[in-house]
Amino acid sequence: MSNEKNNSGATRKVTVKAFRFNAETDYLPYYKTYEMEVGKDELILDLLNRIKWEHDGSFSYRRSCRHGICGACGIKVNGKPVLSCKQNAQELVELFGDELVFEPQSKKRAVKDMIIDKGDFWEKHAAVKPYVEAEVDPHPESETIMTPEQVENFLDADYCIQCGACHYACPVIEVNEDYLGPAAFAAAYRFTVDPRDEATIDRLETTAELGSGVWDCVKCFECAEACPKDVNPIEKITKLHNLQFEHHVAERNVATKHAEGFVRSIKKFGYLDEQDIVLYSEGLGVVKHLSEAFKMIKAGKVHPFDFQKKKMPRSKNLEEIQKLIEISKTHEL
């Protein structure tokens, strides 16, 4: 029966390994296996429902709207962040094979099975003032009109549903508990560019802090990959970098000097001089990287004593690149 269905493509026999943990009774988490035939139209949320309704009523997860709006049902499948009510199950079978591993967005924050404590997410979201701050006439005689260009400038940041997929996919969040995270930065950008808002400088100063702000982003693009609404948080992080320079909020430190050094190198050679950018960014502080430098020399990544190899090539299109930099820059670094 199942083979006939498999051959027709209508259903697939799938093994689901589900993360199980009850913070009130379990010392350690464990995985429980469930076998099921999965139809071509079934969503990951349908599989979560079947585990609960057909196998184990104690299985716990969040769900609400089933329309990709509330953001409640985010989990990870084989490490991939998904919104359960939007993700087709067989698409993931095609990607990962017949064994799907269901885990909460953050295992270390698990409360009960797929349910996590999102307290850190909401605290960081609140820290960037995710609302319009303005003196509002209590009895306005007309609505506030925005131009199409002003609305376009939101860059879909207002589509965020606070599901936490990008936040818990971010590798910086895993190692730096102070880092505000991509969802908070997307919200910060959305309200900073709102023409009604009067908290631009406050928000830019908050997101400029070293350790917690946008300068600690590692540009891995995991947030863009994870977002189920295509908000593209890394794009907003980059915009916040520029806004901090434009509003003279960016302070001169290793992070902003790294940005300067990048432009400096491209303008000079048309290529990135990786040795120079470290020296330019860190200054005398570069000595703390000596152990890494020795490893790079040993691996042939840098050549401090070979002046021929140290010599940076220049792009044959350098003049064109320099013109593009002049055209695109919005301010002097």
Image (cartoon, rainbow, N blue to C red):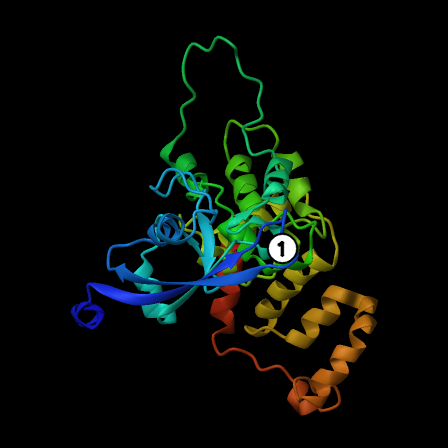
Q: Which amino acid is tagged 1? A: Lys
Indicate the quadrant where residue 42 lies: bottom left
Q: Is residue 200 visible?
A: yes
The residue that label 1 is drawn on is: 108
The local secondary structure at tag 1 comes to helix
Residue at 66%, 56% in the rendered image: 27
**Residue 93 location in percent, x, y?**
34, 67
Could you classify mark 1 by the number of other residues whose Cα lies within 10 Å: few (under 14), some (14-19), or many (20 or more)? few
Q: Is residue 331 visible?
A: no
Question: In this orientation, which residue lies closer to the viewer: 238 or 277?
Answer: 238
Question: In this orientation, which residue lies closer to the viewer: 271 or 155?
Answer: 155
Image-based side of 291 in relation to 191, left or right: right
Residue 7 higher or lower than 169, as above or below:
below
Residue at 66%, 91% in the rendered image: 308
**Residue 221 location in percent, x, y?**
51, 60
Task: Give the number of callouts.
Answer: 1
Q: Quadrant of the N terminus?
A: bottom left
Residue at 50%, 30% in the rendered image: 195
**Residue 234 location in percent, x, y?**
52, 54
Question: In this orientation, which residue lies closer to the viewer: 258 or 121?
Answer: 121
**Residue 144 location in percent, x, y?**
43, 21
Image-based side of 292 in relation to 121, left or right: right
Q: Quadrant of the C terminus?
A: bottom right
Residue at 56%, 34% in the rendered image: 130
Image-based side of 10 in relation to 288, left or right: left
Question: In this orientation, which residue lies closer to the viewer: 166 or 7?
Answer: 7
